[in-house]
Image: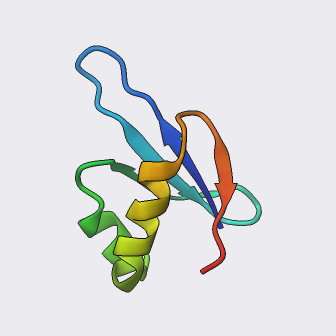
Amino acid sequence: MYIVKVKGVAKIPDYVQLRDDEFTLLAYFRVDRPDKSLEKIGLGDKTEYIMQVVNELPFGQIKKLEL
C-alpha cells in the first residue's frame, strides 16, 4: 500500500491518498478527518500509525506502507 499527501491551495484543504500495489485509489481523505475513510476500508485500527506517517511525510512524496 502507498500513501501520498497532497497540498491544498486556497480554500481546498490538504488531502491524503491511500493506494494499493497497482496504484488503485483505496481512500482519499482530509488530513484532519481520517476516521470514516480508514474504517470504510478496514484500517480503522491502524489510524494512529497512518496519521503518524502522514504528519512526517512531505507534500507530494509517495511512501510505501507496510501494514
* Left or right, 56 with reference to 45: right
Q: For residue 9, what is the image quadrant?
A: top left
* Residue at the image position 50 percent from the left and 42 percent from the top: 5
* Residue at the image position 53 percent from the left and 34 percent from the top: 59
Q: Is residue 40 visible?
A: no
> Who is closer to the viewer here, 57 or 7?
57
* Left or right, 28 with reference to 37: right
Residue 60 in picture, x, y percent from top left: 59, 34
> Who is closer to the viewer here, 20 or 58?
58
Circle count: 0
* Residue at the image position 64 percent from the left and 40 percent from the top: 61
* Residue at the image position 76 percent from the left and 61 percent from the top: 22
* Left or right, 23 with reference to 32: right
Residue 46 in picture, x, y percent from top left: 41, 79
Compared to residue 46, the image places residue 22 above or below, namely: above
Q: Is residue 61 visible?
A: yes
Which residue is situated farthest in the front direction here? 56
Compared to residue 56, the image places residue 59 above or below, namely: above
Q: For residue 11, what is the image quadrant?
A: top left
Image quadrant holding the N terminus, namely: bottom right
